[in-house]
Image (tube, grey):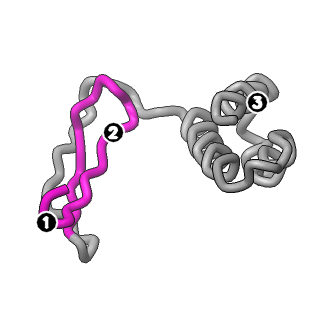
Amino acid sequence: MKNEIQRWACTNKKCNEFLKFNTHGVEIENNLEHNNHVADEKRSLVRQKLSNSVKRKAVEQLCERPSKIIHSEITPGDLNILDTKDINLFPRVYSLLV
């Protein structure tokens, strides 16, 4: 953003709430009310975090097998939260990158 201000938005696409921070990490504007939706489930947040890290690794390591990248990024804590349905989404996401 302008003047190196960081803007962090809500993960819900229909929500307009946001936070703004300056270059020193000091909050300069807070627009968080979240009256229009419930908070995201921990499962959804973990899946998004894992998906983003798998995509990043897939771009960096083009010769690596998708299953190896996914297994290297999953932590034991993630296995307690996610189920096989969540994990099965990753090969499809990865195949779009290659």
Of mark 2 and mark 1, the one earlier in the sequence is: 1
Helix, strand or loop for disc 1:
helix
Q: Is residue 79 left or right of residue 14?
A: right
User: Which residue is painted at 86% across and 47% down in the image?
Assistant: 68
Above or below for 60 versus 51: below
Query: Does 19 appear in magenta?
Result: yes
Helix, strand or loop for disc 2:
loop
The nearer-to-camera label among 2 and 3 is 3
Q: Is residue 53 left or right of residue 68?
A: left
The residue identified by callout 3 is 91
User: Which residue is painted at 64% across and 35% down in the image?
Assistant: 97
- The x, y position of residue 3, in whole percent, is 13, 66
Which residue extends farthest bottom?
24
Residue type at mark 2: give it.
Answer: Cys
The residue identified by callout 1 is 3
Helix, strand or loop for disc 3:
helix
Q: Which disc, if any, is residue 10?
A: 2
- The x, y position of residue 78, in whole percent, is 73, 46
Above or below for 23 versus 79: below
Of mark 1 and mark 3, the one earlier in the sequence is: 1
State how far apart marks 2 and 3 are (Cα): 27 Å
User: Which residue is painted at 23% across and 44% down in the image?
Assistant: 18
Residue type at mark 3: give it.
Answer: Pro
State how far apart marks 2 and 1 are (Cα): 22 Å
Q: Write the start and end of the magenta stretch as one range.
A: 1-22
Please tell me which residue lies in front, 12 or 96: 96
User: Which residue is painted at 19% across and 62% down in the image?
Assistant: 5
